[in-house]
Image (cartoon, rainbow, N blue to C red):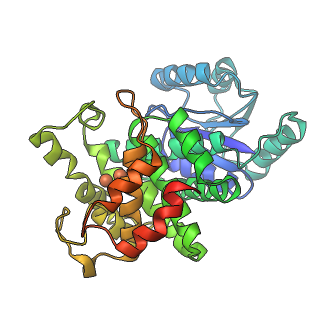
Amino acid sequence: MPVHVVADTSAKLAGVRAVLERKHAVTSELLGGLSPQRSKISALVVKADLRTVESICTLKKLFASLSHVRKRIFLIDDTAHLSVSQAYALGATSVLVGPLNQAKLLAELSEHAAASSDPVDPLDAAATASAGEIALASMFSAIASGTRIDVAGAKNAGARIAACIEEYGLTKWLATVRSHHEGTYQHCLLVTGVAIDFGLSLGVPSSDIERLYTAAMFHDIGKATIPLAVLDKPGRLDEQERKLVETHPAAGYDALKDNKGISAEVLDAVRHHHEFLDGSGYPDALCAESIHDIVRMLTISDIFAALIEKRTYKQPMTRQAAYDILNGMNGKLERPLLAAFKDVALTR
Ligand SMILES: [Fe+2]
Ligand SMILES: [Fe+2]
């Protein structure tokens, strides 16, 4: 069952997720962070201090957009009556008081799942894309606010995208993401889907699929340090803006390098997804032998996804036109890999 967790600290978020993740498809967000598109949520679990006006106001706004969610469980640390009544005033359908009681929380959710008359397909493309966007929004806001990045949440979202693409194919994924999502999150969801399908088409082992979707989910995280006015600028960037955008691979690397949940291969991909075989890329002007396979695959997926993105100010490029552009990038991308990418680009 898709369960959405909201908490006012990263530690609370991680604690609740850890309890729920083995049984449910979990998405989450930090209270007061960016507001991602949320849909297909069956139950909401909230763990926040209800003694601050700020939390209450933010939750009120959040609940206004989630009025369709019928199960709303509040976890309250303190036993003050005021907090419990505040939870019900906000629209809680049940309140669990005291230290987090795993068994009680899971029982509440399974009762709801049993009673729910419209079970949601866990592979539903729209729900999967929304979960992916929520995971991306959570990690972008963690970078922007200097708080802990929810690596497990991003990997979980990537695994769902992989399952969805295996079931329904890339074409459905591209259509779903392009019709419901915008800007950097749309781009990251497209890159993740394309990279996964590239791996699936080559028959790589599941451990490599996991590396690919993790690298793709995180590849542009450094853009969290760049103003939206620049990222979403319609039309061409000037020289200064282009230089600023080009700081994002190193910024992403710096933000992730001390995170134990991020492997060396994923770090490498985050830093080097704009490198080219002929040494003309950035930030390190690497040459062919220093650019690893996963990075080469990610770079092809990244450029393709950027070309077919839907923007409010321009028509999306066709898959054929985007593939033709990749083929015209002489010396920059690996030829045999590009040839293998043809099916992914055009038909799958
Ligand atoms: Fe990038
Ligand atoms: Fe990118």
Residue 254 seen? yes
Vertical placement of residue 300 versus 224, above or below: below
Q: Quadrant of the N terminus?
A: top right
* Residue 262 percent across, percent down from the top left: 42, 67
* Residue 48 percent across, percent down from the top left: 56, 35
At x 25%, y 36%, the residue is: 227
Count of marks overlaid on the render: 0
* Residue 230 percent across, percent down from the top left: 23, 35
Q: Quadrant of the C terminus?
A: bottom right
At x 35%, y 27%, the residue is: 313
* Residue 207 percent across, percent down from the top left: 56, 74
Vertical placement of residue 21 versus 226, above or below: below
Tell which of 346 and 6 is nearer to you: 346
Vertical placement of residue 325 versus 129, above or below: below
Quadrant position of residue 43:
top right
At x 42%, y 44%, the residue is: 308
- Which residue extends farthest left? 239
Quadrant position of residue 268:
bottom left
Residue 220 seen? no
**Horizontal placement of 277 versus 264: left or right?**
left
**Horizontal placement of 201 versus 122: left or right?**
left
Tell which of 228 and 84 is nearer to you: 228
Tell which of 296 and 222 is nearer to you: 296
